[in-house]
Amino acid sequence: MKKHNFSAGPSILPQEVLLKASGAIVDYNNSGLSLIEISHRSKDFVEIMENARALALELLGLEGKGYTALFLQGGASTQFIMTALNLLENKAGYINTGAWSGKAIKEAKKIGEIIDVASSADANFNYIPKGFEIPSDLDYLHYTSNNTIFGTQFKDIPQTDVPLVCDMSSDIFSTTLDFSKFAIIYAGAQKNMGPAGTTLVVVKDEILGKVSRDIPSILDYQLHIKAGSMYNTPPVFPIYTSMLTLEWLKGLAGIAGIQEENEKKATLMYSEIDLNPLFKGFAAKEDRSTMNATFNLTDESLKDTFDTMLKEAGISGVNGHRSVGGYRASMYNALPLDSVKALVEVMNELEAKA
Ligand code: PMP
């Protein structure tokens, strides 16, 4: 039986994408060869790469607007250092909203001067800071749009003329935004896009080439752009699977279409958390993530009963991160509304039983 997969990442992908991708592992397009045993320079793979890059820009509404999409390796974690190496000359500002922002800050500090523009560390990152000043002399401002671990999400893009760099690993392609406000967007594939192994980086071309350092080649965006995202052998399978997911998303009316579904799922989930006295949400209400709902039991002695009921209902991956505890229901693009209904039903049954 297929489980209800609430895993935080790597996470659920559309079933039709999995079926197509697994077929390509054995025989790509009736070519008599597997996708993973052909040259990345072959016509077949170059087509996949170009299609994936074009689809990413199209879905984000950035086609023809001076942006390039790259599919790189090293995870979003490599982008923590790569963004700083490519953009940081004098100083940069960071908004600290959780573990991943903290890691981005730690890496950037190895490259140059970093200013903490705002932080929610004072309340274990259960909210998104507001009303903060953004200095106008920064090389860039970095923030994490969705905090996977804590379940908070920026609802608005920070207002500034400073170039914006955003880690969208856990909410890319889930919500419509004016993506042309960003200088760099990056996201590991393994939430809303594909398997782990590739990271989408969308770069505004004009932002590059302004730092004085000699950037190591593999970490230089300009070299990757020049090489058509094939500076070295790209991770062909994660890129192919990401392309299939982007095609699936396009078929669902793109980000606007999936946003409607995501809002239905989040509304259902959070109304149960708020109405059921056995549960308490972790994140501040106005900052709740549509992707990762974090919550706790109000009576810890019910944990074993609840966990057994979840297991019996085929609900998988709802354990909270060790730094928050409790539960986390990740509701990425490919998670059906029916899975949220199944989880809410178990929460209701627990209330009836307790
Ligand atoms: N940023 C965010 C918001 C994340 O959720 C994660 C991974 N869960 C990362 C960065 C790190 O990504 P990776 O493991 O691909 O380096």
Image (cartoon, rainbow, N blue to C red):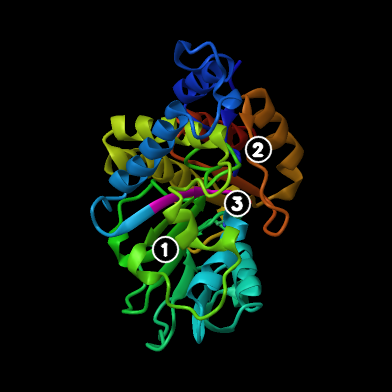
Ligand 1's quadrant is: bottom right
Dot 3 amino acid type = Gly
Q: Secondary structure at mark 2?
A: loop
Q: Label 2: few (<14), some or many (≥20) within 10 Å? A: few
Dot 2 corresponds to which residue?
354
Q: Is residue 72 magenta?
A: yes
Instruction: State the CA–CA distance, disc 1 to disc 2.
Output: 49 Å
**Alpha carbon of mark 2 to alpha carbon of mark 3: how far?**
43 Å
Residue 185 drawn at (x, y percent):
43, 59
Amino acid carrying label 2: it is Ala
Return the mark for residue 184. Answer: 1
- The answer to whether residue 288 of the structure is visible from this angle is no
Q: Which residues are magenta?
A: 69-75
1 or 2: mark nearer the eye? 1
- Tell me the distance, in whole angstroms, between the alpha carbons under discs 3 and 1: 15 Å
Q: Name the quadrant of the C terminus.
A: top right
Question: Front-most of 325 and 85?
Answer: 85
Task: Point out the tag, 3 or 1, that comes first from the N-terminus.
Answer: 3
What residue did someone put label 3 on?
A: 75
Observer-nearest of 146 and 268: 146
Q: Is residue 91 above or below residue 119?
A: below
